[in-house]
Image (spheres, rainbow, N blue to C red):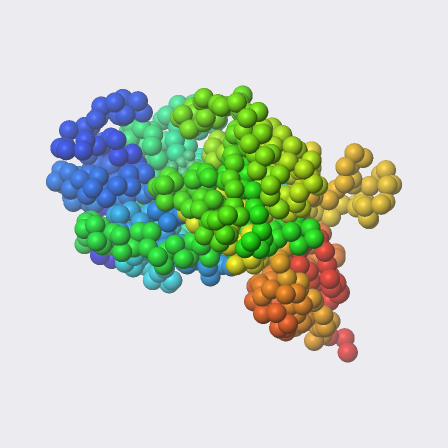
Amino acid sequence: MNNEMLRKKVDQLTIQEKIGQLIQLTGNFFDKHNDSVVTGPQKKIGLNGSYQIHNTGSILNTVDKQQIIEIQRNHLLKSTHKIPLLFMADIIYGFKTIFPIPLAQTCSWNFPLIEESATVLAKECYEEGIHVTFAPMVDLVRDPRWGRVMEAPGEDTLLGERYAESMVNGIQGNGASQHIPKGKLAACIKHFAAYGAAVAGREYNAVDMSENMLKNFFLPSYAKGIEAGAKLVMTAFNTLNGIPCTGNKWLNRDILRDALDFDGVLISDYAAIDELITHGYAENQTSAAKQALLAGVDIDMKTAVYANELEKLVEQNQELHALLDEAVLRVLILKNDLGLFDDPYRGIQTTEEDMTSVVLSKEHKATALKLAEESIVLLKNNKHTLPLSRNQKVALIGPYAEEKATLGFWAITGDEEDTITLKDGLSTLLDSSCLSVARGAYLLDKHTENLYDKYTDKLPVEREDEEALLEEAIAIAKTSDTIVLAVGENTYQSGEGGSRTNPVLPTTQLRLINALSTLGKPIVLVIYGGRPLILTEVEEKVSAILYAWFPGTMNGLAVANLLTGKANPSAKLSMTFPRSVGQIPIYYNELRTGRPQLDEENKYRFASRYIDQSNLPLYPFGFGKSYTHFQYSDFRLNQEEMTKNEQIKVTLTVKNTGSYSGKEIVQLYICDKVSSITRPVKLLKAFKKIELKVGESQRVEFEIDNDMLKFYRPDGSFDSESGDFDIFIGKDSAEHLFKRKIRLVSKHTT
Ligand code: BGC
């Protein structure tokens, strides 16, 4: 159908039927066996009539194909106009084959591989009958107290943009075409906007930021996802400069629709329209419905606000009726782009054979393994503690040694039983006589932070004697050459609703680390977590640290491959690791100050510094070690001056001078020396991930062009400004191996 035909379809609908298209409910609103309506959930959210359920346009988080078939079939039997339901779900980093959490994925800086993971995700969902995934989440994050950093691409704008683009391409795969091909889903960019900047990292808290910050740092990743063709955008829970995003006309109409040219479906976050009232922005549900519609929100996720309020609003107001029609048209266009009018059961495979050929297939697991290996960051490796050798006696200790819950908070469709544990992974690579295992400590402290009730049954209630656990661990550690200590935070300590004031390892695990560190044996910490944890206290007590994040289904194998050198770590941090909570928010691309601290030794009081701690993070953005060594040399620029139409070529040689083949991520940062608005101390502008065998070298080339130098200026224009720029080349954001000045000129003088 073309848009004209769809528009006619909208005209044929009654007001109630139109509103229905904008309602999104969960599967439990629909009886499994016939068309009677479950009254419990309906009452709970306050839906007035069952006709609203018959008219519903989309379903949230029903991910079982039998249920999907049943709900769709019942719906179509009743639906006068035979408009199929859309099934949307949060499949953020894998359906059954679970990939590392997004924050880990971006540490790979391998965006083609990230795109491949999204392709796998889409394929597995497609066969289950899911149409839309609420991914990618592309909120820029600078505060590791916020639990949702685990599902974000990190603190850098360029990495955020690349992540948004790769995910949309992998999920939708439709390029310029309007229709979403077989095996693909519609993608949803979220959360619009700036949700990652919640004050003090506290979940759902307000966001207050300048237009400079918003436009130059936070908006570009959403913009990139939209440019890549994402069919949906989701609003954010937070207020932005005082106005809740879900009722924010400026944000959603002027910026999203007009400036970013988004013409797809804007869906509210879960119950966010109703929350306009709790925000103190709407007096009641009638005004919440009006504000959301005026702000351009098409679908109301999981409240009765549109369902109960829109009818009387549009009957009284032609302008609102026109907005309703527009919103309905956008939903129908999405359904049409997915081909649902031709096949409402799009993609669903019903035979077991079909399913197993895709879900958790060998190929999918191979992609997950590769991405996990490239996402896990080697933070420390003193005296070549790693890699382990095959016949080294290893004591594998810690609550994560045999833990299967390493999928991370948003893997709602993943099955922990499919996870390879670290013990299983290591067992395949070390001689069996060399590996002994002990738990040593519990995952959580006894009186731990209040984890969301629903999950408390997952916490160990009955505890054995913790002393006995510790003693057993010490005993096996004593007979080993090396201790591999697998520790970390629990899955439910990060993710939505997982803000922490003090993101450190649990006390019980710190006690274990302390006890083992007195034995004089090398300790390799393998750390699991959904955020950069504060490791200052443990860092100096161990010889090596491998930061595993939540690595997904292939956990144990990926970590074991890295520990034993079967794979060489190549990941680099996409988010800074602070030394202390007091340094947060901390990020590499901070704005310049009038009184910078010139160097760490400079103890001049009146500089921008702390008197009780260094300004430097524990591990900077872009940092990550390898088992081999990469030497950078022969840095050149083809010219030092360029006009807006020219480019400067930057070249250097990178040589693998160590004894393992490996991958290196060469990073290029730029600092705008003088501009009409203060720019950051440096900004990542390009990077290259290269692979070099032992002794091999490669010439790496970057091209600096005018686009790289542009920014949103105070007058609203997006442009570069003539003058000097510093270019830095390095292995991370802190250590610059080469620095050179270039100049942007309006025309050459000689
Ligand atoms: C989250 C969204 C998610 C939605 C639907 C909300 O609580 O903020 O990211 O897509 O729930 O499950």
Which residue is located at x 26 percent, y 52 percent? 356
Q: Which one is nearer the viewer's eye here, 541 or 346? A: 541
Which residue is located at x 82 percent, y 48 percent? 599
Can you give x and y, in whole percent of width and height, for residue 640 in the image? 73, 71
Q: Is residue 131 left or right of residue 633?
A: left
**What quarter of the picture does the C terminus occupy?**
bottom right
654 w.r.t. 527: above or below: below
Can you give x and y, in whole percent of width and height, for residue 688 in the image? 58, 64
Q: Is residue 122 left or right of residue 597?
A: left
Q: Which one is nearer the viewer's eye here, 426 or 121? A: 426
106 w.r.t. 193: above or below: below
Q: Which one is nearer the viewer's eye here, 10 or 485? A: 485
Can you give x and y, in whole percent of width and height, for residue 403 in the image? 46, 38
Let me know if residue 452 appears in the view. no
Image quadrant where residue 72 sits: top left
Number of labelled discs?
A: 0
Which residue is located at x 63 percent, y 55 percent? 625
Image quadrant where residue 693 sits: bottom right
**What quarter of the picture does the N terminus occupy?**
bottom left
Q: Quadrant of ligand 1?
A: top left
Which residue is located at x 62 percent, y 73 percent? 696
Which residue, as the protein is rendered here, is positioned at the far right? Answer: 604
